[in-house]
Image: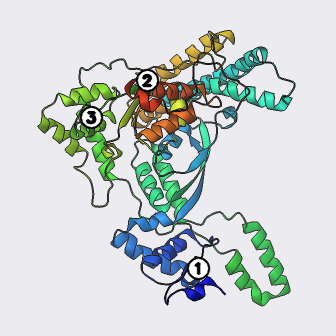
Amino acid sequence: MSSDSFLPPGARNQTDVFAVHGADPEVLAFAMAKYSRSALSMRESLTEISAQRAEQFLNTFYFQYGHRSIADLAHVALAVERLSLLAAIVLVDEQRWDGQERSTRYQNFLKSGWYFPDFGQDSGSAQLYSETVGNLFDSYKRTTAAVLEVLRRRIECPESVKTDFYERTLKARAFDVARYLLPLATNTSLGQIVSARTLETQVSRLLSHPVAEVRDLGVKLREAATGPAWNVNAQAAAAFVEKVSASDSSLASEAAQLLTREVRTAPTLVKYAQPNEYEIQTRAELAQAAAEILSGQLIAESPLVDLVERTETLEVELAATLLYSAAHHSYRQIRDLVAALPEARVNEIVSLGLRHRGAHDETLRAFHAGAALRFDILMDIGGFRDMHRHRRCTQIIQPFTTVHGYETPSSGDLGGDVEILAEAGVLADYQSALAAAHQASTQIAASQSPEAAQSALYLFPLATRIRSLFKMDFSEAQYISELRSGPAGHFSYRRVAWEMYLALQRQHPSLAAHIRITDFTKPIDLLQR
């Protein structure tokens, strides 16, 4: 006899768990939202819901009543192809983001092409831009080949290792070195799976960006989500409908509706996404405030990783973080300057970050304050892009600039006193290409044309240093240190992870003892991936 026969009236012990497939994202979001408003089961809800009913519901509860959590239930898969590395960095800068991008380690980016912005009537800047990108790609090609030869000479292929694996692994290590030369104009591709809520925020943020390509990307994302989606089974489905029609024409219409109907992934939830005036106006005012407060303050030297101890009030942290987002100085330098300001001035800076906030705007990321650990990191853009993937921490990213110079890869994981670019005979070529790119970007940025001035950013090679503030708890610091210090990783972020660990060890030695760190200073097996 079943044990359920002994249950008191009303008791139910039979939990039902099932996966759902085939429902449009917004219809599924509506069905899940109905759990809070209806006793119907998921099967019953999905059976009775149509796309039209879902749209009516979402228009009411999402837009009129502001129940934004409903959009968290609708997930959309999007492919974004042939966008620049610059646009990709901006695109993925979401804390609730899941996706994958083309790897600079496993693919030759000579084949990807590059983005050419609109220079208006400034033909001189356009020509300089093209020549500079071409020079960087030529140097990238020479560096890849030269470094690969050095690796072949220094690392023998063990008998236990297949030749194709050996070649692929060494080529990946060569790409790790050569990628420093890739300009932000380089094209890449990525895929993302995000909720409609994140997508709406993402589109709005992209539409608010000063770079034209990024704004255009926001428009295209909105169109892709609200327009007809590409159906991977469309061709096979259409062929099957033809077979059905040939055998029984009366079933053709029904088969076509079921198998080849047009699907729009988020026709309702993203359609109203517009530029965010709160972000646009605040960005301009913070830039002005930072220029005034930091006027005459030379950028102080700072280490690769600075774990900034907490000495300031929450108000000072918020004001310093807001200014940091619009400056190029270190967080420690800005924090100390702000801490010395009168309380009224500190509060005024905080108010700048909130003055233009609309009724439905989330506060700026700078207001994610109070984390126990704050790592101010100054590293190459290429390595930063790897660190950028860590979503469990708050990242405040400063604008791109040439004022911090650029990184030169040293050993390329060979260790010891090896200077891999010098041994490969391409160090002078590397330095010349980097210096010329920074000089060209400065020249184009000084152009009278607004379009040309923004285009200067695309000439920054991935070797260019960028400063970013990572705020996190101990668990995330432990995770990053352990994961990113591993021998299979890129030497740029392996060094950062190691320096994060050392900073933690200095300030919190008993806690650092629990981190399973890989010593960056010790030799590694270059054939381990």
Q: CA distance from mark 1 to mark 2?
A: 63 Å
Q: Residue at x 32, y 33 (%)?
A: 324
Local secondary structure at mark 2: loop
Picture coordinates of residue 106 (x, y %)? 69, 35
Picture coordinates of residue 231 (x, y %)? 68, 65
Q: CA distance from mark 3 to mark 1?
A: 55 Å
What's the amino acid at mark 1?
Gln
368 is higher (above) or lower (below) than 54: above
Which residue carries the number 1 mark? Answer: 14
Picture coordinates of residue 212 (x, y %)? 46, 44
Dot 3, how many residues are within 10 Å of its Cα: few (below 14), some (14-19), or many (20+)?
A: many
Q: Is residue 520 visible from the viewing direction of this image? A: yes
Q: Quadrant of residue 444?
A: top left
Q: Nearer the viewer, mark 1 or mark 2?
A: 1
What's the amino acid at mark 3?
Ala
Local secondary structure at mark 1: loop
Q: Residue at x 72, y 17 (%)?
A: 146
What's the amino acid at mark 2?
Thr
Disc 1 or 2, which lies upstream in sequence? 1
Q: Nearer the viewer, mark 3 or mark 2?
A: 3
Which residue carries the number 3 mark? Answer: 320
Disc 3 or 1, which lies upstream in sequence? 1
476 is higher (above) or lower (below) than 146: below
157 is higher (above) or lower (below) than 190: above
Q: Is residue 205 left or right of residue 387?
A: left
Local secondary structure at mark 3: helix
Contact, mark 3 vs mark 1 (Cβ under 8 Å): no
Please tell me the numbered disc located at residue 402.
2
Which quarter shows the N terminus?
bottom right
